[in-house]
Amino acid sequence: MERGGGGGWRVSRGMLPLLALHAFNEYHRLPWKPPVTAALLATNTLIYLRPAFLDSLVPSIHEVWFNPHLILKYKDLKRFFLSPFYHASESHLFYNMMSLLWKGIQLETSMGSNEFAAMVVALLGMSQGITLLLAKSLVLFFDYERAYYSEYAVGFSGVLFAMKVVLNSRSEDYTNVHGLLVPARYAAWAELIIIQMFVPGVSFLGHLGGILAGILYLKLKGGYSGSDPLTTIIRGATGVLSWPLRFARYLFRRPRIYGRGTVGGSDTRRTAPIIWRCPACTFDNSGWLSICEMCGTSRSGNDLSSDQLSRHSNIPLEELRHRRIERFG
């Protein structure tokens, strides 16, 4: 998350094409394309670009800044739920989406799309809630209002910190965090400190809330056997939404057609005396022929050479070749 005020933001140019190219290369090399990660990338990018067809539907960034004071005073849930999907600048979006691409592909591939989607929803809600709770606690117990309780922040990085905790929770390896080699399970904490020290304008509470949300998610997940209710709901909704598509595929399924016959599929013309199916290639031939037009196999299943086929069918060999060229190119 990045902090900001109520004014406009300077937008850099040229980084989004690089993001698109990197995302395309990553997805192109994958045998299975993680759809939830792609949807999150597209959502964040479209909200930042605000194309004409979305301009009237999507609130402006000034309406969704995450501000603890405004959220609690006016019960403004729009700021609570939408602020992670807004970014203050093109570079802010670029680095967050590059991180989402890397983490999302690994997590969604290992967890499955339904569980990954449920985790993202849970982490978003918990990270925003913990950040709000921390800001309010600083006011109540330490009278520390200006720095955190009244700050404005947007960005997906709180959720990304939570995802980093989940991704590295069982890793025994070491990882490089901005030049510092640390155990992977503590990488989120190291990144929190380094970013706060060297990157101006970031939301410390937003990132800390994300780390605590990741830890809380792992605790809740570890203490609950089986699929969590949120995953079950998302899996059910996905099944309901995809049912019309599966039904349409079944309804309009057709066997492939080649020449006058069909290849594959079930034979629905068992009683038709003028059609027989080749036992070798399943091509449906005319009942007047005893040799398969497609592969040259006899009706009884024995392969014939071209000369034998020509003599058996009483058609000159050159004529048979000419007919095959005309039929099959």
Image: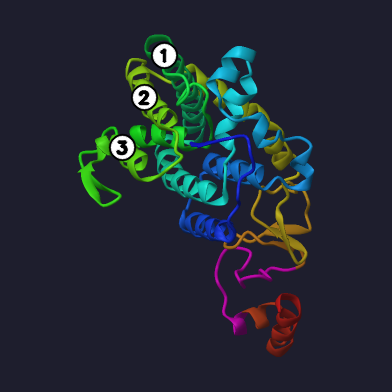
Question: How far apart are the alpha carbons under marks 3 and 2?
Answer: 14 Å
The label nearer to you, 2 versus 1, is 1
Residue 298 included in the magenta stretch of the image: yes
Residue 107 included in the magenta stretch of the image: no
Q: Amino acid at mark 3?
A: Ile
Q: Secondary structure at mark 3?
A: helix
Callouts 1 and 3 close, C-beta under 8 Å: no
Q: Residues within 10 Å of mark 3 (few under 14, many from 20)?
A: few
Q: Which numbered disc flags the more N-terminal residue, 2 or 1?
A: 1
54 left or right of 150 in image: right
Question: How far apart are the alpha carbons under marks 1 and 3?
Answer: 23 Å
Name the magenta segment's main secondary structure.
loop
Callouts 2 and 1 close, C-beta under 8 Å: no
Q: Compare residues 254 and 93 and report the one nearer the observer.
A: 93
Reading the image, the residue beneath label 3 is 193
Reading the image, the residue beneath label 2 is 212
Residue 60 spot, x, y in % from top left: 69, 36
The label nearer to you, 3 versus 2, is 3
Span of residues in magenta? 289-308
Residue 75 spot, x, y in % from top left: 62, 14
Q: Amino acid at mark 2?
A: Leu
Reading the image, the residue beneath label 1 is 143
Residue 254 spot, x, y in % from top left: 73, 50
Q: Compare residues 173 and 301 and report the one nearer the observer.
A: 173
Instruction: Kindly give the residue lying farthest to the top in the view shown.
Output: 140
